[in-house]
Image (spheres, rainbow, N blue to C red):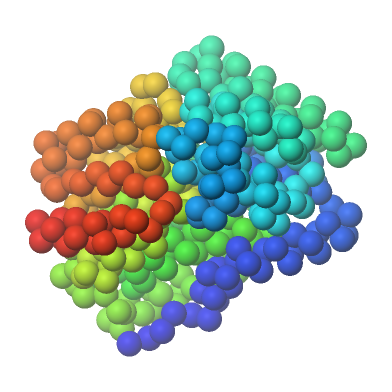
Amino acid sequence: MKSLPKDFDAFSDARRQGFLKAKEIKDRGENIVGVFCTYTPKEVIYAAGAHPVSLCASNDETIPEAEKHLPKNLCPLIKASYGFALTDKCPYMYFSDLVVGETTCDGKKKMYELLGEIKDTHIMNLPNMKDEDSLKLWRKEIEKLISRLEEKFNVKITEEKLRNSILSCNKERKILKEFYSLGKLVPPPISGYEIYKVLEGANFTFNKEEQNNRLIKMIEHLKEVHKNNEGPISKSAPRILITGCPIGGVYEKVVKPLEELGGVVVAFESCSGIKNLEELVNEQENPIDALAKKYLNIPCSVMSPNKGREDIIKNLIEEYKIDGVVEVVLQACHTYAVESYNIRRIVTKDKEIPYIALETDYSQADFGQIKIRMEAFLELL
Ligand code: BJ8
């Protein structure tokens, strides 16, 4: 059995290594913009000569502090995002010159009001529908972000700069997509846990050229592993699709047991996975129009209706030969919790495969319970 290529370590360690890189960036006098959400049009940040970085929100370390200001019964992702800012424990937040947030769910947009007291924050007014008027509004919001960044960093964001950053972000998306599409192979040459580590690591990698080259080498290596039948996954392992809320704070207690118990996660519909990377920005159109369309089209549950997510899940079930779907709903996330009714319906009725919804938070209290439920679920597949 062939081991993972050494380039994998660069991704699994990217978050920690990124701290040092962020410091180097600041030492060189360059700017960093902290982001929380897939809706942030990062091409605009690159076009301003700044570096976008995902802010810490994926463990419960700072939640007790956050709960001094926020209600306990709130999504753990929101509490952790605020807690890291409040306690100064996220180096990326510390190094960020500006934080960009969007009016996604109610909890997040109200939390941003408090965050604005701690950190220079720019909020984009994200519409919750995908019609023509919403597109105009979102386009305006992108223009406002451009003005804000120009003013903040004393730069000019030209059409040419936007076009260049669209080209390079699309290039990154295409390579990441080729990487996660390895999950289509039977058996996949890499576990879902490792796929997720790489996708997550890309959020903390500043040098995108280096990242692309590493990924291309890994893809070649893993294709070879598959061709020679040298991979670690059994051909008969039940193939799982993960959907729902972002899983950065819970993948250890959801993905790991699923795979230790004999299943394999072959696709992630959630943020960090396909939701963000599937659709490219149109390179021929006016760049602001193209960015507005691409980002407004992201199929997150904060949109109403959100038919795109159902279509993606149906396609993924076919393309990745999915045997069962696991939906992760973070505690108090109403939009995903409500949508889970429709998702269960399309998975079990239209596609006739098993589905399970797990409501959880960032604590370890339900670790044993999740494992037992995963075991029972895998027995159905
Ligand atoms: S594009 S999934 S990152 S909004 S914070 S909605 S889990 S209650 S994170 Fe999200 Fe952007 Fe959508 Fe992705 Fe629910 Fe929690 Fe709100 Fe959340």
Percent position of residue 268, x then y: 37, 52
Residue 150 lies, with reference to residue 125, above or below; the image says: below
Q: Quadrant of the N terminus?
A: bottom left
Q: Please report the residue visible at 79 percent of the width from the left and 27 percent of the height from the top.
A: 147
Image quadrant assignment for residue 117: top right
Q: Please report the residue visible at 73 percent of the width from the left and 24 percent of the height from the top.
A: 144
Most foreground residue, 380 or 351: 380
Residue 94 vs residue 305: left or right? right
Q: Please report the residue visible at 31 percent of the width from the left and 55 percent of the height from the top.
A: 366
Q: Quadrant of the C terminus?
A: bottom left
Residue 239 appears in the picture as rendered? no
Residue 238 appears in the picture as rendered? yes
Residue 279 lies, with reference to residue 231, above or below; the image says: above
Q: Please report the residue visible at 53 percent of the width from the left and 16 percent of the height from the top.
A: 134
Most foreground residue, 273 or 125: 125
Residue 100 lies, with reference to residue 233, above or below; the image says: above
Residue 135 vs residue 113: left or right? left
Most foreground residue, 198 or 183: 198
Residue 362 lies, with reference to residue 126, above or below; the image says: below
Percent position of residue 5, x then y: 48, 80
Percent position of residue 209, x then y: 67, 63
Q: Residue furthest front?
A: 68
